[in-house]
Image (cartoon, helix red, strand yellow):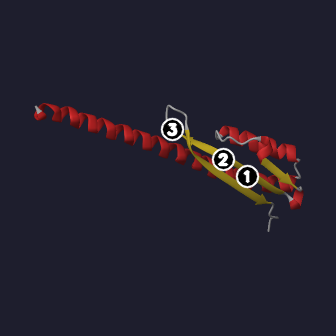
Amino acid sequence: MPLARTPNLKRLVLLVWVLAAIFYFYLSYDYIRVTMGDREFAEYLHHIVQIAGTERRTSKDIRDLLLLKATQLSLPVEREQIEVKGSGDSLDIAVNYSVDIEIPLIRQEIYSKKFNHRVKYQPPN
């Protein structure tokens, strides 16, 4: 009798391991996707600070550009999370937001990754 159960038990154990691997792969993929999106957003933020400082753009223009980029990268950045201080040579921008890493299919948050960026205008050399 135990010999008949062994193949079924092995299949069940294999199924549990496969499901666990899929679960961790999804969580890793979600975390890496968010982190790479934030890295691209940070590079864009540095670029925008330099352009906006040189061209003396308004804070509304800067917020609109950053929100557009965040939307393109599927980052949950809201208008009030973008703080623009000064203009021109004294331009200082801070963006603070968090992204929830969720369990697949259930959409239950298990981790919240916080991102904080602060960039100041640097005059060209």
Q: Which residue is mark 2?
A: 98
Q: Nearer the viewer, residue 54 or 40?
A: 40
SS at circle 1: helix
Q: Position of residue 88 (x, y in %)?
A: 88, 57
Q: Earlier in the sequence, mark 3 or mark 1?
A: 1
SS at circle 3: loop
The CA distance from mark 2 to mark 1 is 16 Å
Q: Position of residue 40 (x, y in %)?
A: 64, 50
Q: Quadrant of the N terminus?
A: top left
Q: Which residue is mark 1?
A: 45
Residue found 79% across the figure and 68% down from its top: 125
The CA distance from mark 2 to mark 3 is 16 Å
SS at circle 2: strand
Question: Depth-wise, is mark 2 or mark 1 nearer the camera?
Answer: 2
Q: Earlier in the sequence, mark 2 or mark 1?
A: 1
Q: Which residue is mark 3?
A: 103
Q: Could you tell me the amino acid type at mark 1?
A: Leu
